[in-house]
Amino acid sequence: MKPKSLGSAKRIGDLKAIRTALELYYSVNKSYPVTSGWRSESGSTSDQVIPGLVPIYMPAFPADPSMNKSAGTSIYMYNSNGAEYKLLDYIKERETEIKSIL
């Protein structure tokens, strides 16, 4: 397995773990953690990215294996109105690749 594939496997595992924690949160609270916009470790500490998730529903919030917190690249991002949520792995380098494909 190439090192790049290891990073991808970690990202997939991280996002699945976050999703599982969010579903546990929802089963108890009947809503997802609410935010007023996109949140990430770039603008918050890891336990504040998704309010109320750490440490009750997951022991620690994972970090993208290539995260550059100061530049705000390769970060997991979250946004929710309580009824639904969006979770993504924002990788700045891929943004350029995606724009060139479109």
Image (cartoon, rainbow, N blue to C red):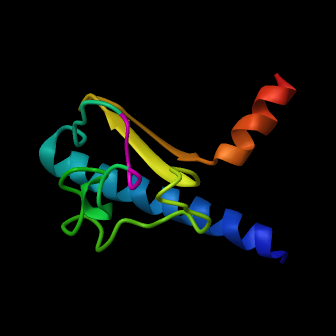
Q: Is residue 5 above or below residue 38?
A: below
**Residue 5 appears left or right of 33:** right
**Nearer to us in this view, 16 or 69:** 69
| The C terminus - image quarter | top right
**Residue 76 appears left or right of 96:** left
Q: Is residue 48 above or below residue 80?
A: below
Q: Is residue 53 above or below residue 37?
A: below
| Secondary structure, magenta segment, majority class | loop
| The N terminus - image quarter | bottom right
Q: Magenta segment: does it hold 39? A: yes
Which region is colored magenta? Answer: 38-42
Numbered-mark total: 0
Looking at the image, which residue sits at the far top?
A: 102
Residue 91 in the image, given as x and y percentages of width and height: 63, 48
**Nearer to us in this view, 73 or 38:** 73
**Residue 68 appears left or right of 98:** left
Question: Which residue is depicted at the point 32% across and 62% down?
Answer: 46
**Nearer to us in this view, 23 or 34:** 34
Looking at the image, which residue sits at the far left?
A: 29
Question: Which residue is depicted at the point 34% across and 31% down?
Answer: 84
Question: Which residue is depicted at the point 32% across and 31% down?
Answer: 37
Q: Magenta segment: does it hold 8? A: no
Residue 10 in the image, given as x and y percentages of width and height: 61, 69
Residue 75 in the image, given as x and y percentages of width and height: 51, 53
**Residue 34 appears left or right of 76:** left
Question: Which residue is depicted at the point 25% across and 55% down?
Answer: 48
Query: For residue 9, which quarter of the picture?
Result: bottom right
